Amino acid sequence: MDRPAAIVAIASDHAGLEMKERLREALSGWGYAVQDLGPATAEPVDYPDFAEAVASVVSGGRAALGVLVCGTGIGMSIAANKMPDVRAAVLYDDFAARHARLHNDANVAVFGARTMTADAAVARLRLFLSESFEGGRHARRVAKIGRIEKRLGPRAET
Ligand code: RB5
């Protein structure tokens, strides 16, 4: 039997709506089960509401990964990173797209619709999805991010 498709939650604000549609189609074409959390129209909305929607399903384990789009990608990433266990990264170039997964174990890919083309965003999302976390020394660093989040304070080097 085929494995169930990995769930990817996606959302944008009004500035990112068109790019979100492109990314959603690409994800479906690659075989992911896409959960589109809006918006449905280009009516102005507040990006933190949509960042929270995606970040909460990723944080709660109800989606494997998330994708967010706003004008720059910055507001969405700031907001999404407030949620426990969410590591949202703006994929501003191809190197960053690969290394957000390899080194940072990012679980939310963020794009700026006003700072890159939709073709570039689709290509970067593909790169992001094709990589896996390297672990090793990077696991220690990502664990330290978790400690900051839980306000546990510094931990001795291991
Ligand atoms: C909306 O005009 C814009 O501020 C938003 O899309 C985003 O760029 C915020 O970071």
Image (tube, rainbow, N blue to C red):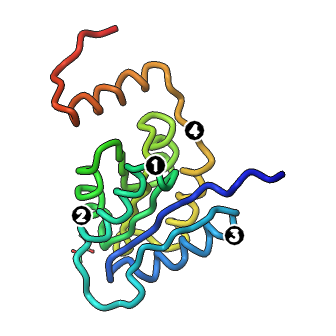
- Label 3 CB-ligand 1 distance < 8 A: no
Q: Secondary structure at mark 4?
A: loop
> Which residue is label 4 attached to?
132
| Marked residue nearer the N-terminal end (1 or 4) | 1
x and y, in percent, of residue 73 in the image: 32, 64
Residue ID for mark 1: 61
For disc 3, the marked residue is 29
Please report whichever mark, 1 or 2, sits nearer to the chain's N-terminal start.
Answer: 1
Question: In the rendered view, does 134 fall on the left or right side of 153?
Answer: right
The amino acid on which the numbered mark 2 sits, given as a three-letter code, is Gly
Q: Which-is-in-front pick, marks 1 and 2?
A: 1
The answer to whether the residue bearing label 4 lies less than 8 angstroms from the nearest atom of ligand 1 is no
Q: CA gap, disc 1 to disc 4?
A: 18 Å
Local crowd at mark 2 within 10 Å, few (<14), some, or many (≥20)? some
Q: Is residue 76 above or below residue 143?
A: below
Q: Which residue is at a point 29% across and 56% down the rendered structure image?
A: 80
- Residues at marks 3 and 4, CA–CA distance in whole angstroms: 20 Å
> Within the image, what quadrant is residue 43 found in?
bottom left
Q: Quadrant of the C terminus?
A: top left
Kindly identify which numbered label has been placed on residue 34: none
Residue 137, x across and y down, in percent = 43, 19
